[in-house]
Image (cartoon, rainbow, N blue to C red):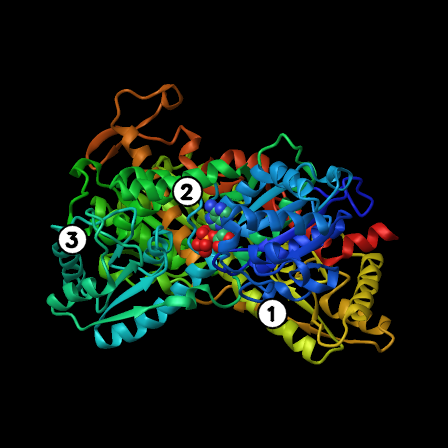
Amino acid sequence: LKETTFTASSSDSRKKKIAVMTSGGDSQGMNAAVRAVVRAGIFHGCDVFAVYEGYSGLVHGKDLIKKMEWEDVRGWLALGGTLIGTARCAEFRERWGRLAGAKNMITNGIDALVVCGGDGSLTGADLFRAEWPSLVEELVRKGEFTEEEVAPYKHLTIVGLVGSIDNDMSGTDSTIGANSSLERIREMVDYIDATATSHSRAFVVEVMGRHCGWLALNAGIATGADYIFIPERAANPLTWKEELKEVCRRHREKGRRKTTVIVAEGALDSDLRPITSEDVKNVLVDLGLDTRITTLGHVQRGGTAVASDRLLATLQGVEAVKAVLDLTPEDPSPLIGILENKIVRQPLVDAVKLTKSVATAIESKDFDKAISLRNTDFIESYDNFLSISQYDDGSHLLPADKQLNIAIVHVGASSAALNAATRSFVLYALSKGHTPYAIQNGFSGLIRHGSVKKLDWIDVEDWHGIGGSLIGTNRSLPSLDLGTVAYYFQKLKFDGLIIVGGFEGFTALHELSEARKQFPIFNIPLTLIPSTVSNNVPGTEYSLGSDTCLNSLVDYCDAIKQSASASRRRVFVVEVQGGHSGYVASYIGLVTGAVAVYTPEDRVSLKTIQEDIELLKENYNQDQGENRSGKMLIRNETASTIFTTELIADIIQESSNEKFETRTAIPGHVQQGGAPTAVDRVNASRFAIKCAKFIEQWNGKINDNDLDGSDKGLRFKFYHGKKVSTVGDNEKSAAVIGIKGSELKFTDIESLWDHEANIELRKGNTIHWESLTAIGDVLSGRLLLRNRR
Ligand code: ATP
């Protein structure tokens, strides 16, 4: 994200005429992508056209190809589906259809095409580009155009954006719409769970995904499902029924009152026979369970896009325009994707080819290959799912001498996925034979009351969906009484610790790591899972709970904007949390279409407020008839000590010449609460299991006689009556797990503390969301206004 800069403006010499279309199945976030292409295109001085109804619009032209203006896409972020329509178009599969498309493109002077769709749509786009010179030649031959007329159209630039709820495209971790669809499933299964638990019922939930099990797999993790069926892991036709029964029976015997099985619509057995929801239901009925089927259907495509899809679509739309301007005729057509948190370009043909090879692998019954062709985190997620749902059968227990005592503690303010992370850690730990301990009510709970509890399977089985902290959290730090903390660590023979928290958690980890010299008992692997709505922990660009916070703010701001649009002349100044970090404000401003964002990183001044008032007036002048939309500005809670939320609102009101009035809105602690989103739940599992493995690996080194160079010089201590070396001398054994650019990795606390943390302002030195503010300013029109002045 950091690489995105905006040096170009309306004077850009590379002026292009860009068409944007949505094609194939619709998905949430397509509107955000179109909006971003339109506005970023206009910002760079290009003409942007919308092609309505997918390739049909290209083939039939006329009114279906429309030049877009800045205000045409106002308010689109909050709207689901695709407002420029989508269609399946048989004509475009034929050469004559593509010839008609080429003619309509040249007639409108269009020389670049951004297609947002699935693999079929992108295959069509690439074929169109490959054929383009021959299509142009044929048009000249048939007398449609002269050589001179087609001279500027010798090359067609194509850029692909993947809009698909299935998340089935190789070369990107996420497709536009996948997270929204997953969130809709998560929400529906949460509803179903309440009634299932009441009646002690079983539910078979069928989700979309004809060739890809991503939705079913991640829904399985997010909803704590007992079992899933996905196409990439075809079931054994002889054994699946018994295995399913065994897992569900075992969970019931442990005390679970409900059973949830998620079935992808493309689920099959290894003889390629479909496994239907009805088949699964029959097995559960046979087990004696009162079983119902819920087929979620098009609910999964519906509704507004979640925050992360709006962001993904917006960043990719902006990147698509940049790619159009950068590409030379020799460059292959790119597909814009995302790897972890980094927007990337991949050759479109390769990504489509790889995607198709998954279907081929499934057809030829090579399921290992099918799953290996998915992104690396697909296999990891599948393994995580099994760890927390099926390995409670004792099949993955470690030998007794490798079984550990691992503690978990929540530190700092509440955020949504603390329980979800704890659940996954506990279930994983139990599957390996470790003993998971919860330190209750933070370090003060340990110090004052020795509050530690062993957690069992049934204690945590429904924690995936419960916000807040069930083991209690507070801001107390180990330094409150390090000696007592060390006493309990010694007494309970902890082999590792997972801290879940924000900047206090970060500080706690540093304190324990520093205290190792004084208290060698802390010479065990120590980890931090960053969890805070502010996302201000050094060492990561994502924190658990921030996705839930952002989604509650998206709902809040959408509602505020709608109210503002109804009363026509009302402007809202919304104050959001984030401490000294402008992450939440910048993100929310970008994905809700705020006129302006005020963050601690950018100095707020009377001048900037005056500019924003001018922009507001301009916006009101453009709003005509029904094309009106609410106006909103976002202010981070500590953006300025002088320009408070009220003062900004008053200044705007005062300067409005009674053209509009202002209101303030402060969502407050709503931002920390609520049920965690699917994204937060899935990442909670991912991070918690990775941290538990980190602790296993460091402890593994204790018994390893053949330590490598970096681990030499370890001290010894007595553990469980045995003399073992400790990991403490290696500072890398105290680390923060986090996402940095395209990588998920551990970074040791000492280097983060010394080089990357701004302790006073409680955030990292690197502002990893810098580009969000810059792109927000481009798409709101703020930067164009500044450039004009
Ligand atoms: P989804 O993931 O929702 O299925 P998709 O883009 O894969 O989306 P398709 O129905 O496969 O959906 O393709 C959409 C349109 O793209 C088709 O109706 C057709 O117009 C065009 N298209 C697909 N494949 C080709 C192809 N091989 N050649 C030319 N055009 C194609």
Decide if residue 175 is in sight here: no
Left/right placement of residue 38 relative to residue 180 reads right
Q: Is mark 2 within 8 Å of ligand 1?
A: no
What is the crowding at mark 3: few (fewer than 14 residues within 10 Å), some, or many (at least 20)?
some
Per the image, the residue denoted by label 1 is 558
Of the numbered discs 1 and 2, the one sitting upstream in the chain is 2
- The residue positioned 55% from the left and 69% from the top of the image is 555
Counting every numbered tag in the picture gives 3
Residue 189 x, y percent position in the rendering: 34, 67
Per the image, the residue denoted by label 2 is 355
The residue under label 2 is which amino acid type?
Answer: Thr
Instruction: From the viewer's side, name the closer residue of 338 and 421.
Output: 338
Of the numbered discs 3 and 2, the one sitting upstream in the chain is 3
Instruction: From the viewer's side, name the closer residue of 91 and 490.
Output: 91
- The residue positioned 85% from the left and 78% from the top of the image is 658
Nearer mark to the viewer, of 1 and 3: 3
Q: Quadrant of the N terminus?
A: top right
**Distance from Cα at disc 1 to Cα at disc 2:** 35 Å
The residue under label 1 is which amino acid type?
Answer: Asp
- The residue positioned 72% from the left and 52% from the top of the image is 108
What is the crowding at mark 2: few (fewer than 14 residues within 10 Å), some, or many (at least 20)?
many
Left/right placement of residue 418 relative to residue 286 reads right
**SS label for mark 3:** helix
Per the image, the residue denoted by label 3 is 240
**SS label for mark 1:** helix
Instruction: From the viewer's side, name the closer residue of 151 and 66.
Output: 151
